[in-house]
Image (cartoon, rainbow, N blue to C red):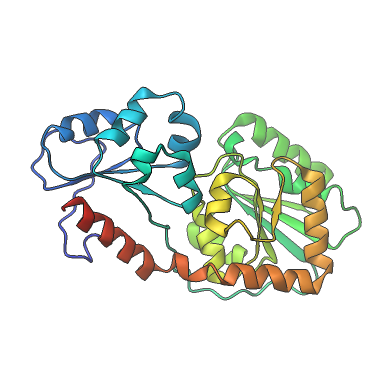
Amino acid sequence: MLRALRHQVRVETAWSGERCDALIALHARRSHESVVRFSATQKPLVVTLTGTDLYRDLPDSAEARASLEMAHRVIVLQDAALESLDPSVRNKASVVYQSADPRLGHAPPKDVFRISVIAHLRAEKDPLRAVAALARLPGKAMEVLQIGNSLDEWFGREAQAWAAREPRYRLLGGLSHRRALGWMAKSHVLVVSSAMEGGANVIAEAARIGTPVLASRVSGNLGMLGADYPGYYPLADDAALALLLDRAAGDRRFYATLKKALGKRRSLFAPAAERAALARVVREAFH
């Protein structure tokens, strides 16, 4: 996107003194050393905050907080993130929603209510909450597709155990981005069950496709979907998620409400919107 805006861009894992006019650092704590070195140049410095930054590092990491103080501008990926920032940092922060352009239409099956979960299996994603909810709905014509690699041995074993005892659970493992989006488009809902989330790109993709989202009520999801979105459930509460799934499957009016509410967010995740927001941050950093 920066190149499309006629900037010359070099991507590095760290800044080690190469000549440049500005630095955009991803992750306040992990990029701290580069931020400190670049700050001495007095050139425009932008720090982009991740979910790990916001909901894990900032409260405990002096380095992460120092990176934000040195930055001329700060990027967050969804608007609820602004509430996690000190006022001095919030005043120089901008929301840049990650965009998506999947070019797929929503086409779920007619014979089964399909639920997709697209996330690698690790604790931050609470990835097995959907199948736990499914188990509370015996006899329902539903299925859960679990898409993602197992990054934690415990979750890998648990997923295999669920697959052995729940025939409606399909463990698809890691798929290409294109195939994962294809399954999303062919699902009635996407479950985003994260315990910690900076701004899930799968939500942007679902909004662009038109697949309704059911999400844990955590800051990152609220910032992507909006406080008034009707598809939230309390974090780690599979009983509540089961009720939400049952309602989405059986109540056409509620399902239509989900689709309409998500549709209102769709334009936020357009590539043109991200490009314009990014251009504005860069422009402000130079003034």
Callout count: 0
In this rendered view, identify the residue nearer to me: 139 or 235: 235
Viewer-proximal residue, 108 or 48?
Answer: 48
Quarter of the rendering occupied by the N terminus:
bottom left
Residue sitting at x 61%, y 39%: 195
Q: Is residue 116 above or below residue 16?
A: below
| Spot occupied by residue 255 in the image (x, y as percentages of width and height) | 74, 69
The residue at the far front in this view is 87
**Vertical position of residue 84 compared to residue 200: above or below:** above
Q: Position of residue 235 (x, y in %)?
A: 69, 42
Question: How far across and down, in percent of the image, does residue 243 sit?
Answer: 83, 54
In the displayed structure image, the side of residue 179 where residue 94 appears, left or right? left
Q: Is residue 249 visible?
A: yes
Location of residue 85 in the rendering, given as x and y in whole percent from the top left corner: 42, 39
Question: Looking at the image, which residue is at 60% across and 56% down?
Answer: 227
Residue at the left extreme, as displayed: 19
> Horizontal placement of 151 versus 242: left or right?
left
| Quarter of the image where one finds residue 47 | top left
Q: Residue at x 44, y 29 (%)?
A: 57
Residue shown at the point (58%, 52%) measured from the top left? 222
* Picture layout, residue 210 above or below residue 161: below
Say if residue 167 shows up in the picture.
Answer: no
Q: For residue 154, which quarter of the picture?
A: top right
Height in image: 83 above or below 270? above
Q: Is residue 215 left or right of residue 1?
A: right
